[in-house]
Amino acid sequence: MSYGAILAVLLALTVIGFYLGRGRARALAAGSRTRLHSLPGYYGAHVAIWIALPALILFVFWISFQSAIVEGIVWNGLPDKVTVQGETGQKEALAPERKRLLIDNIANYATGDIVSGEITPLVKQGAARFLRLQALSSWIMAAAMAILAALGLLAAYRSVSPAMRARNRVERAILILLMVASTVAILTTVGIVLSLLFEAMAFFTKISPVDFLFGLEWSPQTAIREDQVGASGAFGAIPVFAGTMLITVIAMIVAVPVGLFAAIYLSEYASRRLRATVKPVLEVLAGIPTVVYGFFAALTVAPMIRDAGAVVGLTVASESALAAGLIMGIMIIPFVSSLSDDIINAVPQSLRDGSYGLGATRSETIRQVVLPAALPGIVGAVLLAVSRAIGETMIVVMAAGLSAKLTVNPFDAVTTVTVQIVTNLTGDPEFDSPKTLSAFALGLVLFLVTLCLNVIALRVVQKYREKYD
Amino acid sequence: MTDAPSTVLISGQRERVRRGLDRRLRAERRFRIYGVVAILLAILMLLFLAGTIVSKGYPAFYQTWIEVDVLLDEDLIAPDGKTDPETLREDGDFRGALIESLVARYKPAGREQENLLVAMFSTDAERTLQNFTIANPDRIGGTISIWVKASSDIDQLTKGAIGRNAPESGRKVKDLQLRWYDRMEKDGRIETRFNSGFFATGDSREPEQAGIWGAIVGSFLTMLVTLILAFPVGLAAAVYLEEFAPKNRLTDLIEVNINNLAAVPSIVFGLLGLAVFLNFFELPRSAPLVGGMVLALMTLPTIIISGRASLLAVPPSVREAAFGLGASRMQVVSHHVLPLAMPGILTGTIIGMARALGETAPLLMIGMVAFIVDIPGGPADASTVMPVQIYLWADSPERGFVEKTSGAVIVLLVFLVVMNASAVYLRKKFERRW
């Protein structure tokens, strides 16, 4: 029985339960609604919740654990001597990855997916058992769900009485659902931290954290053969961090002046109409997907910079930090400008009026009164923009280089944290090589750094806003 | 004359002020110009970007076709005389028939020239021929005139992306092919048509056969999963935090959490998806299901934040009136506050979805970068999405993929513009000042 069908049946039962409950409540009311504690619909909803909720909870748990249990039973049912990749051995003595391969093959053969390697009788036999067990399991689940739903229906239906506080019960159930939904955000953060920590710990058992954080050599390709040349696998992340900083600094050099001046002009000088047209246009820059910027940087801007460099006699790498940084800066302009705009607007008019009254020009007022007053907020905005630039991925993946180089020359190719995460994890990652795990260590650093920047920036921005409210 | 010195002093100051005034007004003008320049720079960059993409991308929407006369040679197509579709599909040597007819007409000298001639046509040509023959088995044995797709290099030549005057060694289209091309053109056998295949097929290694439909379907399925997960949860969380939550440590923590999650780099969500959904729960790689789950987690903070803002904008008087009529808290929210806040929440959701649609990095982490030809049939099938397709094509060395990439960018941007425009429309239409 497919899961879709099971859920459809449950839905139908729930709807029926609703009408049953409501009908019974109406019958009990016998024409005078005031006899009931709640409106009849609430009695129906109460019955519906009792049918659907326990069965759904069972469903979720069952499908989370079903595959592990079925695989375990299939594994125990296999003969003691098994053959994997042409080698026959004792089942219990099998290496974990071989065991995984065999079980995956059985599961894939059963579901009609591609099986790696030869289809042995062993796999066929296991697959038949797998299918049988799976069918059995889903039938048991369906039966259990049906029993739960029936019990729920019975209990809730019988409890319908004029004195029952159906509305309060239904509302409490809904409130609990709302509460659970609001904890998803916390669960996400916990999930991020745990998954990064877990994999990063696995990495740090192979490479010491000190070597990782302070090493000057980064070349994550580990040797496939012992005697391979130039592939020792070095995991000193300083060049990667330095590359990230270089590109971020270039981006900020573009974004901060342009964004800030645009914000100042729009909030202090521009007419209402100009503001209403220019602001959305700037915001379009923020709405363009980063992959488009990356394509633009790699295809148009990088060759342009290289050719321009060739004209004045500079050697510019075709994946120069300058191209990536420049485009990233353009992407961040609206970020800086709209945040600063809000902050400049929050500076009270009385400060400006006072300054004008003393005979200051507009620009003097802005430079000497408005900007100092808005400074903490603007610093916060810039910090948020920096965190954005550090975490930006697609532009640098497409326009920056792969080789880690410790340099401050913007015409050189450098690599960044996000580029290394992507290159080390795409393809078919092996989860025991330091190369793959290093991506999680870099991810952890990235997460922590951006988190710190965000916390500080949000604090600053909020504190500042409150001051004038 | 006791006040004479002070008059002198004042006029001296006035003189100083006057002298300084020019400088200050110049500074004022300069300052203003900086602002204008900053805005113009940003707008120019936007125009430059849009101009580049459009000028590079619009050729992707049309394509070169060549007319060929083909003898449907029975010996090659139906060697054992059977002309049912099954046999034609399995055994028919349509490539052979095509080459035979081409050789007969253009008379290449030797094997090498023959290869050059055949290379002018897409490998899709034999499929066109095959489909025609299956539809019209009675034409076997006769000569037919049929339009087939040109190879990507010839297509680029028609569009002017390959220069005729470059030295032959560095040119994709050789002199001999140019001569044949000119002959075909003189005979009226070359034509450019709307590239409908671009909107109907999946990815391909051959630029002239690559389409974006697979990626559009993948994006649609991914967005569907994202919407189904993120909207109800985001709405529920926003309602709880704004209307029900007591002010305590836990809700403060949740609030800080949500604000921070909104600023976490998207690639970190990809790492989460890889570690939790793929490695721990063993969900399928490259599937829209997992992509949608990851993007849902990413979009959730946006929906919650905008949802709370619109709930907050509903004036307390509405709630008080409902309370006054005896409604319970839940009834107040679900009957009165939520309907009034809905347009704002939907606007925020659309904007969040638009951002998710353009997101690439987290999807790279969960394996949606695979080369996938088939159109995905469901959320558990391997597929790719539009931004990832753009990334993949941008990485392809073939010249023909440059225009495909830009074409795909145009398609993606059209989707984004439509989504954002509908958000703006929604906001304008239901905007309410209390």
Image (cartoon, helix red, strand yellow):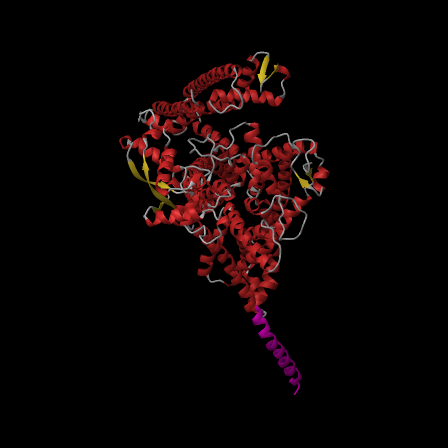
Image quarter for residue B64?
top left
Does residue B7 show up magenta in the picture? yes
Question: Does residue B282 appear to the left or right of A249 in the view shown?
Answer: left
Specify start and end residues of the magenta stretch as a single range. B1-27
Provide residue A234's location: percent of width, then percent of height.
69, 38
Is B103 rendered above or below residue A245? above
The quadrant of the image that shows the N terminus of chain B is bottom right
Residue furthest bottom in the image? B1
Between A41 and A464, the residue placed more toward the observer is A464
Between B212 and A455, the residue placed more toward the observer is B212
Provide residue B122's location: percent of width, then percent of height.
41, 40
Question: Does residue B263 appear to the left or right of B214 in the view shown?
Answer: right
Is B107 rendered above or below residue A248? above
What secondary structure predominates along the stretch shown in magenta? helix
Image quarter for residue A37?
top left
Between B110 and B127, the residue placed more toward the observer is B110
